Amino acid sequence: MKSFFTYFTMILILIGCSNNDENPTQETLKNLVVISYSPTSAMAGDEITFIVQNIIVSKEYTILFNGIASEAVQNFQTEIKAIVPSNATTGEIVIKYDDKNLNVGTLEITEEPTLLITSFSPTTAFTGDEVTFVGENIDPAITYAVFFNGIEGETASVTENEIVAIVPQGATSGEIEITYEDTTLNVGTIEIIAELDKLYGYLPIDGAGCEVLKIHNLDINTGELLEEIAMLYNQSCYSELSSNFFREANVFVHTFTTRYGQGLPYGKACSIVNLTTGANGGWTLSDGAIYDGSILAATNNKIFYMYRYYDGIDDIYEIRSSNLNHSNVTTLYEFPTNFIYDIKNSGFLPSTNELVFFTTNETGQPIFMKLNVETSALTSYNISETYSSIFITKTERIFGIKSLGGDEHEIVEIDKSTGNILSSLATISAQTVEKIDYSLSSNRIFALLRDTNYDQYLYTLNLDGGTSTNTQLDEQNNHKDFYGIYLND
């Protein structure tokens, strides 16, 4: 019979054998723990970082964003990174691994920052003008296209605050749309003012001196040389004096010095091209003398001009009128023989049938004169300013260029009754302002400028908004040889 001690020892051995069924060195697996994640709001395509414990880097973890699985998940020693899928919506984040579902928290899905245009200016523009769009969420790295009533304009610049676009040729009033990536944004409406005038310029033919001049159309916004309109032939020309376009008569007039025999003094002649009829001709303005006459104005089928001749005792100055073909010549006024006028700027006022011109007397006093072409009555006013160029509009406004000294000039409006300045419109920095013109359809002043390097510029002043542009003319198109620019409506 076995002792109690023997049975007790056997029980202990059996118990010890039962506890050794599992490996005492194998550690029990621990569950994944998410300590934090960021951001808590994001857009599709953004990366979410989860700070975790108990991660097995080699294990596959599935990240669900409101039920939509991310296709880009990366495991690290203490982190899991996942990309928010494109079709994710706001809701719960769940991490799946093995047969477990770990609810992490919620993620708010935000939209892509939308382009917001808060304002644009101007709201009235011409083709070639810049329009500035001010807004929010503008990305300079994105390509923006701006459409003006369906026609795409050039995008000049993009910053974080502004998009600047140029109104294209052919644009009309209507809606403005900005497109980028897959988005189209309606910005508002713009009024495009039609420029009815055409821009012309005189261009000498290389090597021909002043014998031959070409008349060209120019791009009204850039000054680019376009098609040839007509040619002026001055076979007996010795020097070019002036070139003018008279819109009332739709004629170009080129004046030049000439002489009709060896040893004879030089006179003044003109060559005329009628754009309406295509006629090309010319005739003598004055007999040979040191001081020559000038074209004063042209209206309908008539030209008014200065004529000078020698009567055997004195030089006689007359204002004459003639049809464009130099028929029906009439003397309207004869100046006193002791008074020599330097006529540079003139025009015609149809409402009063008056020739108007700015001149100086023998002492240098600036004078504004008006001659009634029906009655031959001449009135004269002493004025305080001289002008390098003037232009009279169809509505009989007179604009002029006044020198401020040095390279500064002022565009002014002149009282058509007295010749005095009504208002100052703008200041121009240029060595010379060679021509000035005006478009009634767009209420803009155009001027031809030249700097100290002999470069030429097309200057435009919008009288409605006071804005101006200054565009250098293209040297490659021989623009530097232009004698002047002119508008035609």
Image (cartoon, rainbow, N blue to C red):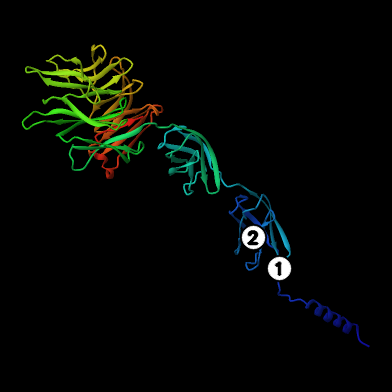
* Residue pictured at 14% horizontal, 31% vertical: 258
In the picture shown, does residue 145 fall above or below 419?
A: below
Q: Quadrant of the C terminus?
A: top left
Secondary structure category for the residue under label 2: strand
The N terminus lies in quadrant:
bottom right
Question: Which residue is under mark 1?
Answer: 29
Count the numbered circles shown. 2
Q: Amino acid at mark 2?
A: Val
Three-letter residue code for mark 1: Leu
| Callout 1 crowding tier (Cα within 10 Å): few <14, some 14–19, many ≥20 | few
Q: Nearer the viewer, residue 187 or 162?
A: 187
Q: Is residue 389 left or right of residue 183?
A: left
Q: Residue 141: where, in percent of width, then height? A: 47, 49
Q: Earlier in the sequence, mark 1 or mark 2?
A: 1
For disc 2, the neighbor class at 10 Å (few under 14, some 14 to 19, many from 20) is some
- Left or right of residue 425, residue 482 in this image: left
Q: Which residue is mark 2?
A: 52
Instruction: Identify the secondary structure beneath mark 1.
Output: loop
Give percent across and percent down for residue 354. Answer: 28, 16
